[in-house]
Image: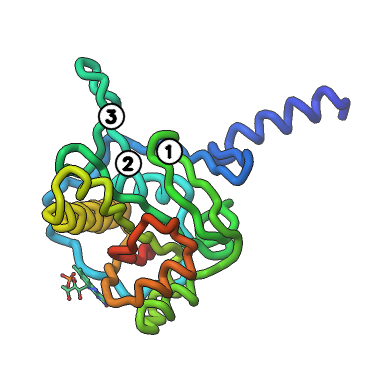
Amino acid sequence: MTIFRSLVVALSLASFLPVWTWAQGSVKLPKPKLTGKVAVEAAILRKKSVRNFSGGSITLEQLSQLLWACNGDLPTDAVSSATTKVIPSAGGLYPLEVFLVSGPETVTGLPAGVYQYVPASNSLTLVEAGDRRSQLAAACLSQMWMARAPVMVVIGGVFARTTAKYGNQGMQYVLIESGSAMQNLYLQAEALGLGAGAVGAFQGQQVCGVTKLPQAVTPLLVVAVGK
Ligand SMILES: Cc1cc2nc3c(=O)[nH]c(=O)nc-3n(C[C@H](O)[C@H](O)[C@H](O)COP(=O)(O)O)c2cc1C
């Protein structure tokens, strides 16, 4: 086979690979789908907290969909050109930051690590390489069932973003918003044929240590997701 033909074959094979690229520790996620086959009522009906994960992996497409449902951006409003998100937010201040903890090949093609979800570019930024699932489960009062989930989503809040406008009442708003993000994650997991299990019982400082959360971010919920 000539070099030219090998190149053509390689390029056509590459078009079947997941749409992601590595650039300075950044992973571009596939575009989330804006329509689905499961009615919201059916997802609500089936929703339950899952704690018995099989150890199977999920795809990068599923991960993208889950993170988008949790804290993604909506398409920019054509009239106001404002960016809004999938969850309502007091004053439109959007205080939540979402992090991902994945294992080796637990998301097809994604190296194990702790990542920050970047909604504006629908991408992940690597925080630290390596499988931190067991350590995170240990930080959650040793709820070791979590470590069998392919991914854990850490929902964090930057309280100052909201309290700067609303004072102490802003604390309440941030907590409410984390519940919205968790519920969206539960429903999206159901719609994808996956399951989610929320965990609020954890040592905050240990979670921060394992996931290297920025100082301004307080961990509010950890959600194990998978099948
Ligand atoms: C804020 C919050 C914290 C939770 N923390 C934990 C937890 O640490 N460990 C756990 O196994 N389940 C946890 N859960 C899940 C609840 O136990 C579960 O939602 C409840 O038992 C109802 O069951 P269902 O979600 O299957 O309907 C939590 C749920 C919420 C909303």
Farthest residue in the top direction? 79
Q: Residues within 10 Å of mark 3 (few under 14, many from 20)?
A: few
What residue type is disc 2 on?
Gly
In the depicted structure, whether residue 74 falls above or below residue 186: above
Identified by mark 1, the residue type is: Asn
On the image, numbered disc 2 is attached to which residue?
72
**Residue 153 against residue 91 in the figure, above or below:** below
- Name the residue at the bottom extreme: 142
Q: Earlier in the sequence, mark 1 or mark 2?
A: 2
Is the residue marked 2 within 8 Å of ligand 1, measured from its CB?
Answer: no
The residue wearing badge 3 is 83
Quadrant of the frame with the C terminus: bottom left
Label 3, secondary structure: give it: loop
**Relative height, residue 210 to residue 167 (above, below):** below
Question: Gap in Å between the C-alphas at discs 3 and 2?
Answer: 10 Å
Q: Residue at x 35, y 72 (%)?
A: 204
**Residue at image mark 1:** 122
From the top left corner, tell me how far across and down residue 149 is, in percent.
Answer: 42, 69
Q: Is residue 116 left or right of residue 166?
A: right
Assess disc 1: are there few (<14), some (14-19) or many (≥20) residues with their C-alpha within 10 Å of its C-alpha. some
- 86 or 94, nearer to the observer: 94
Front-most of residues 216 and 225: 216
Query: Badges 3 and 2: C-beta atoms under 8 Å apart?
Result: no
Residue 35 left/right relative to 105: left
Q: Kindly state the secondary structure of the residue where label 1 is placed.
A: loop
Of badges 1 and 3, the one in the foreground is 3
